[in-house]
Image: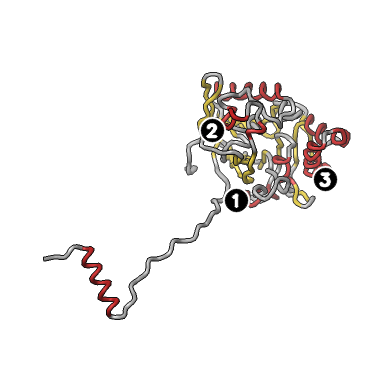
Amino acid sequence: MIKPLKQTLLAAALAMAAAGLAVPAAQAAAPMVKTPAPGFYRVMVGDVEVTPISDGTFDLPMDQYMREKPEVTRAAIAKNFLKVPVETSDNAFLINTGSKLVLVDTGAGALMGPTVGKFVNNLKAAGYQPEQIDEIYITHMHGDHVGGLVNNGQRVFPNAIVRAGKADADYWLSQANMDKAPADKKDFFKGAMASINPYIKAGKFKAIDADGELVPGVAAMAEHGHTPGHTVYMVESHGQKLVLIGDLIHLAAVQFDNPQVTIAFDNDEKAAYAARKRVFDEAAKNGWLVGGAHLQFPGLGHLTTQGKGYRWVPVNYTQMR
């Protein structure tokens, strides 16, 4: 009669022990790695290659920043399986038109702590070097968008022309404006000056004073409100369009459903809401691809209208066949 398997294994183990042989021990679990893959993604817009690149994430107490009751914000955050503080992506976008390599925003660099400042390493992992960047377009001069321009006061992108809205340059690079700013706002000016001034001194900064094409396939559109010169950028090729919206939105869990909710960082909250609604309505109507600096990495998707708000449809994963 055949013994049950359990009895057979037990008998074998007892026999090995009686013979002085060690019973094989179970192997320990492999150590946890706890680091993600390099933070880049790729998508084609017509013939243009766009590479979203992560600078990392930072935690924001969004229940304190959103212009609605904190308990309402916390409920929306919990509904989206998030928690306070909200881990917030900081995304930049590399555009390869085939003739120009254009970067939109640069991440925070050393301005906002150890969880960001990963842009250059991720850029290299994506197959590019800082020296290859031809032009850099800044959506606005907050530190998490311009900080990556410099490292220890030196230009990270030595061959690049940096461009940003003239109204932002006039505001954030003004010593007089910094001097009269409240104490808790002065760091915004200091970060902008430290990041942009090395390019000005090198003759590598040029303000944007009108909407329109900057290089073939990439155009600027003023959408002021979040800052005085906040600018979005449109990538267009073969009828396909991607709009890079900078900080038109900060918290997807709240502002897609309720786009009228603004954030404490908005310079002009009424204008910021109007800009968000204007761009979102056009994107939803025309099926544009949207790229956001603070939408969950890679920050790409489409919008459809839903009630008084919008539904966000993230991009499908693609292997770029």
Q: Looking at numbered disc 3 in the image, what kind of residue is underneath it?
A: Ala
What residue do we see at 68% from left, 43% from top? 107
Q: How far across and how far down the image is residue 232, in percent?
A: 67, 30
For the residues carrying marks 1 and 2, which lies nearer the camera in this image? 2
Residue for badge 3: 202
Name the N-terminal-most of marks 1 and 2: 1
Within 10 Å of disc 1 (Cα), the crowding (few <14, some 14-19, many 20+) is few
Q: Nearer the viewer, residue 74 or 275?
A: 74
Q: Is residue 237 visible?
A: no
Q: How far across and how far down the image is residue 104, in percent?
A: 67, 38
Alpha carbon distance from label 3 to label 2: 37 Å
Within 10 Å of disc 3 (Cα), the crowding (few <14, some 14-19, many 20+) is few
Residue for badge 1: 127
**Quarter-of-image position of residue 266:** top right
Q: Element under label 2?
A: strand
Q: Is residue 187 above or below residue 121?
A: above
Residue at the bottom extreme? 19
Name the N-terminal-most of marks 1 and 3: 1
Q: Is residue 296 visible?
A: yes
Residue 301, numbered circle:
2
Q: Looking at numbered disc 1 in the image, what kind of residue is underneath it?
A: Gly
